[in-house]
Image (tube, grey):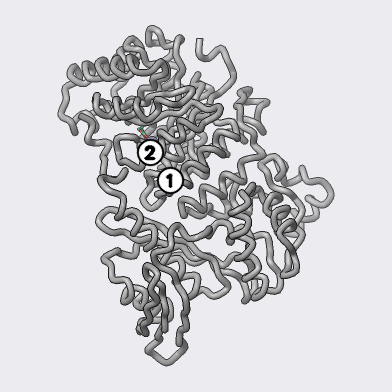
Amino acid sequence: MTTATNRVKIFDTTLRDGEQSPGATMTHDEKLEIAELLDQMGVDIIEAGFPIASEGDFRAVSEIAQRSQNATICGLARANFKDIDRCAEAVRNAAKPRIHTFIGTSPLHRAIPNLTQDEMAERIHDTVTHARNLVEDVQWSPMDATRTEWDYLCRVIEIAIKAGATTINIPDTVGYTAPRESADLISRLIETIPGADEITFATHCHNDLGMATANSLAAVEGGARQIECTINGLGERAGNTALEEVVMALKVRNDIMPFTTGIDTTKIMNISRRVASASGFNVQYNKAIVGKNAFAHESGIHQDGMLKNAETFEIMRPADVGLSGTSLPLGKHSGRAALRAKLKDLGYDVADNELMDIFVRFKELADRKKEVYDEDIVALVQAGAPASEHLKVKFLRVICGTEAPQSADLTMTVDGEDKQVTAQGDGPVDATFNAVKALFPHGARLQLYQVHAVTEGTDAQATVTVRLEEDGLVVTGQSADTDTVVASAKAYVGALNRLIVRRQKSGKDTKEVSYKDTV
Ligand code: KIV
Ligand code: ZN
């Protein structure tokens, strides 16, 4: 019986559901690196992508399948043979392959392919049977399960189990359920459906009402033994259940939730930062576990208590999630070994070539800034090296102040050739963006321009995030610099570089394949 064990499997869908959030697109190499980190941290199942969606997704799933050492590698497929065949092909080389196939079962979702209840039931039978003929490990999801009629949900789950599904996932697709309902739903399904005790029930919660983590944990109490989640809670709209939250909650409150996972929690901080930099989605400062302030204590009473006994205001140790408590500043005389040690303290395990790149940027920063704080180093790593170098900012000087017009004198390398322009705008950033657009004309629309001061003080670095949209393609660029306008220019150019790569990718893109297109 599934509930007899208290081991909960962690199914990470950062590379599928997480990557689906507009603007979070990751490069192929970033996906491989994140999959490797997930595998090393002990994730049981990695949902590596949606193979039919694009050549890029297919390639990422296939390569991750080939490389994975421990985890089961899963691909997503809609309820049709073509999707399922493509998915089977992508996961074929995994030591432990899984096909995850789904269809929307709620009245709203059934209306889209215009199937009757009987027609949909037949489709579920046929597609799960087909998947099971291709692999041993088949997961089936009734999308929008929490808004599906109870009788129909039981009926289709029973059909899927009989057709060979080994995991039944119960998605709360629109983040609609609440903890008590989430627990009751799973326990009632297990009690009611014949054969339910032979398979694993999973929970997949979105965070539209901010209850995703609570709903996932409640589902485990109701009998689910697989939690679907993403790093940093990345995902469409308000995101998904955050891996770090469920795993740490089960660890810290094991007294009242006696369930275990196979996750090495000391790897949490590193992977959180890698996902933030690859996706371009900054982690909010007050985010549980991985936010910048999660272990910061500012008020006098709290600091005093912390000095006397850390347990007064901390329910877990920073080291439990891979953060060191020490904070030795680096300066312009610090060498590579000190930088590597600092990065390790901060939770980053970087490869040699990446260290070299960070070191060069660290030296540039240390020349301009007296003290290089931990946050500066995190910003350097997160801003990352440019994804590709079609465009590069070579020289920028702006004139700004009370007297309009503000102007930007920009030299930019465009595919190896230096080009220069002077442009005006409403403020220095606007003038700079106009200059970039004059040298590289494009139709992308600015969706987001965001500036964060990394530390305090007037010489603080600014991290700038720019999100652009062009014909449905959404890309993000990020850069950090003590000069906000320079950081803005580099972030804008970084986003354009990603856009160029995305344009070059032939065929369709993940976001173009719709869940609605299920038949
Ligand atoms: O949220 C959802 O319903 C999904 C399914 C594909 C499982 O992501
Ligand atoms: Zn989802």
Disc 1 is placed on an element classified as helix
Q: Which residue is mark 2?
A: 59
Residue drawn where x is 71% and y is 59% of the image:
336
**What amino acid does circle 1 point to?**
His
Q: CA distance from mark 1 to mark 2?
A: 8 Å
Ligand 1 - quadrant of the structure image:
top left
**What amino acid does circle 2 point to?**
Arg
Q: Is mark 1 in CB contact (under 8 Å) with mark 2? A: yes
Q: Quadrant of residue 403?
A: bottom left
Q: Which residue is mark 1?
A: 28
Residue drawn where x is 40% and y is 20% of the image:
168
- Tell me where residue 53 appears, x and y as whole percent: 30, 39
Which mark is drawn over residue 94? none
Image height check: is 72 above or below 318? above
Residue found farthest to the front = 416
Count of numbered circles on the image:
2
